[in-house]
Amino acid sequence: MVSGTRDDTRGGGYEAVDVLVVDDDEDVRASTGEIISSGGYTVAEAADGLEALELLGHLDVGIIVLDIQMPRLGGFALLARLDHPPPTVILSAFGLDEAGDEETKALVHLQKPTTPEELLLTIAGAIGLPGDSA
């Protein structure tokens, strides 16, 4: 699902979306998407890594907000399949140490639950778009 879609593209003729939210919990995914949309960003949502891969095939995504543990294809497995992933914010109840993936230290990590303000400021910093501290 894409909300607040822009008519512009960042390149390659793909539809431009500021943020792709990937989380298997429908309520978390929807509320995270609403928070991000309230900050003025366009948002697409995926229920797991496989759905995200499909969307990434036809969307130009500025940043991914990604859960770690999901059925079918988890967050780290998704990133491993991407040659050049966009900046990624890990939003998970699990800490990175618990996840055991050393390569994720370069990614921004937010622990669930997080505040809307912290989420929007993190996204604004990661992709350089105006954030909202609402």
Image: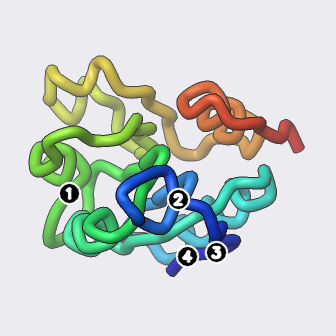
Badge number at residue 3: 3
Callout 3 secondary element: strand
Where's residue 85, x and y in %? Answer: 27, 41
Colour scheme of this structure image? rainbow
Discs 1, 4 touching: Cβ within 8 Å: no
Determine the CA span between mark 4 and mark 2: 14 Å
Q: Is residue 65 visible?
A: no
User: Crowdedness of circle 1 by 10 Å Cα count: few (<14), some, many (20+)?
Assistant: some
**Residue type indicated by callout 2:** Thr
Badge number at residue 74: 1
Residue 30 vertical position relative to residue 69 in the rendered view, above or below: below
Quadrant into which the C terminus falls = top right
Determine the CA span between mark 1 and mark 3: 23 Å
Residue tagged 4: 2
Badge number at residue 9: 2
- Foreground label between 3 and 2: 2
Q: Residue at x 47, y 70 (%)?
A: 45
**Residue type indicated by callout 3:** Ser
Quadrant of residue 102 within the rendered picture? top left
Image label count: 4
Discs 4, 3 touching: Cβ within 8 Å: yes
Q: Earlier in the sequence, mark 1 or mark 4?
A: 4
